[in-house]
Structure formats: C-alpha cells, structure tokens
Amino acid sequence: MTDFATPRQVGGTSLRVTPMGFGGAWIAPSNVPLTQVIDTVRSAWDNGARLFDTAPWYGVGRSERRLGIALAELQAPRDQYSVNTKVGRTLEPEYFEDSTNDSDAADGTARTPRDAESGYRVHFDYSYDAIRQQHRDSLQRLGLSRINTLTLHDIDYGYHPTQLDIVLHQLSADGMRGATALNELKSSGEIDAIGMGCNLETKNAFSWEDSSHEDLVERVMSLVDLDFVIVAGGYTLLETRALRRVFPACAQRNISVIIASPFAGGWLVNPDKMGYMYSRMSGLSAPEHIRERTAGMQEVCSEFDVPIGAVALQFVLTHPLVAAAIPGAASPAEAASSREFIEFDIPRKLWERMRERNLLPHDAPCPDDN
C-alpha cells in the first residue's frame, strides 16, 4: 500500500512536505467571505495539510493576503508548515485604469488583468530585478518573513503565445538573470527550493498536441536548477500525458512533482458546477473524450461504492515522483474532504477494473500495484 501520511522529500533538498497540501486559488474570489477563508484554512490544517500554495495571480494578490491572515489566525509555529508562492508576475498599482496595458492569452481571456477592487495590474516579468521584487512583495502580502519555495508561474504557450523568447531571455544567465535571482535566494537560505509550473489546460492544450510544451519545459530545466515541478492537468485520472516526457525529465534530474488540480479543475468531483481544467472560465466545454472517460470512471466507482475524488487523489499521490498534491478548497467542507478521500479504503478490484476497461494506462502506477 502507498503511504499517504509520511512527509516526502522535495528533490535533493532538505525540505519535506506533507503529501496532502492546500491550494489557495479558490480562496481568492471576492465573493468568498474572509471569515470563510479563515475557517477553510483552519479546516485544512486540522485535517493534516502543512503545505500551503498560493500566487500573486490568484485574485491579483487577494489569495496571498487572505492566506497570510488565515495562517496568522492559526498561531502555529512557523517551522511547522511550508508556504509556496509564485514568481513571474509583478502587481503594479494602477489607480486610473489604463486599457493600453490590457493583453490577451491564447484563448482570448485576460493575460494582464487589472483588479477593479484593488486597482492593481498584472505585469509579466521573469528578470533578476523583478523576481527579487516579487519575492519581497509576496512576503509583504503574506505577512511572513520567509517563504519556503518559489515557483516560476505560467511559462507556457497559453499565457505567452508570442512572448516566450522574451521570457526565456529574462530567465537566462546571459540575459536578464532571473534564474540567478532564484539561485541566490536559495543559496542564502531565504527559500528552500525552486519550482516551475507545468500546465495542461484549455488555454494551452494545443501545445501538448505535439512536443512544443514538453520542449519548452526542458528548455526551462536547462536554464533553472529546479527542485520540483507543479503539474496541473498533465497528470490526473483523466490525463497522463506528463508521463511522456515531463516525468522522465524530472526523474533524470532528481526533480520532484507536486500535483495541482488533482480533480481536473474540480470537474471530477463536481462536473455540473466546475469546468474541465478551467474550461468554464474560457466559455468552453469539456472535450467529448473527457466526458466519455469520466462517465466510464464514474460507473466503475459506483460499482464499488467509492467516491471518484478518493480515486483521483490516491492515484496521483501513488507515483514515486510525486511529493504532494495541493487540491484547492473554498470551504471548510471541501478542505476536510481531501483527508476523507486520502484515507478511503479503495479495493484492489477497482483499479483492476479501471485497467480492464482501458480507463487507466498500464504504465501509470496504482496504489495496490506492489
């Protein structure tokens, strides 16, 4: 049986994280009350989460601010939990809206939005000076003197359909030395580990149809000494394309994997409300093959009376490269459900039936394989 409780090492670092973490994207919307956010983070803590993930992008700073407040309310010793946030986006004050700063991602959604409530505008920048400033800005928003890990956020064809050469130049040692900033923060002890995000979502799905996205991931790996990769959408019950090249590249370099969005953007646990991998945000629907695979998996789960969320979470945490999963939650009940899923007793026959029906590839490990 796979051990889902013992903390796991991140790459070659001394950092160890709980397999069950907390994703802070869904505490960012302004229609989620702050009191609910505080209760949600406390629920995650009470149910064993000690890795908390956030980003300046989530709510244009709101997730970081709210997570910091909620963690302060816990009054827990700082060395008892880890915080991960992201770099690559600077939040600039823009009191009077300037539409010339608008830009779109590949799917037509906002790439550099301005938050109407705070008046802050998102700007992309992966250079040395920007990353140092972004780190300090995140410390301020979180109300912490130290962040454990920093992750390069959204370097992909979805957010940078024409700007990738600029981004890589900003990171490179012979360019604008963004990677150098990360190395300095790690070597000085200001952070424990360096990561990058790797997404497969509606915004950039086209770049996974050939080798484009995987080529890009390996280019970033050649520029940055990574300790982990946060994979969102590329390794779930429904999608295992990260096994093609991303996971092997991580294994070759002793890079751990952290799974974001293990429920495929919420689709697996609530397909009527949530779009597949954020597709609802783009006004798109889930692809037909995803709908068919989901229906087949739901049939197998019903046959064995097992919640599909438990199958999804235990599946991703079984891979030996995976150090943690960070499912998002917007309520105390959602935060508590992750522990229920991870502790659910799933019969071996369920995994066998999934493979018999070709719903899971045979090269993807399952909890009862050993």
Image (cartoon, rainbow, N blue to C red):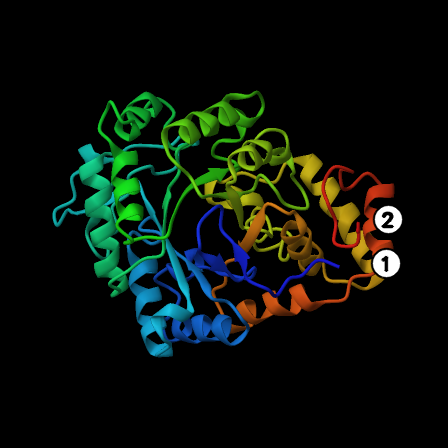
Q: Please state which of residues 64 and 275 is positioned toward the viewer in this rendering.
A: 64
Q: Secondary structure at mark 2?
A: helix
In the rendered structure, the answer to whether residue 260 lies left or right of residue 41 reads right
Q: Quadrant of the N terminus?
A: bottom right
Against 332, residue 2 (above or below) is: above
At x 27%, y 47%, the residue is: 185
> Horizontal and vertical percent for residue 38?
39, 74
Q: Secondary structure at mark 1?
A: helix
At x 68%, y 39%, the residue is: 290
Q: Amino acid at mark 1?
A: Glu
Q: Which mark is residue 71?
A: none
Q: Please state which of residues 300 and 260 is positioned toward the viewer in this rendering.
A: 260
Q: Which residue is mark 1?
A: 303
Q: Which mark is residue 353?
A: 2
Against 104, residue 175 (above or below) is: above
Q: Is residue 91 visible?
A: no
> Horizontal and vertical percent for residue 203?
47, 34
Q: Amino acid at mark 2?
A: Arg
> To which quarter of the image does residue 166 belong?
top left
Residues at marks 1 and 2 touching, judged by CB atoms closer than 8 Å: yes
Circle 2 residues within 10 Å: few <14, some 14–19, many ≥20: some
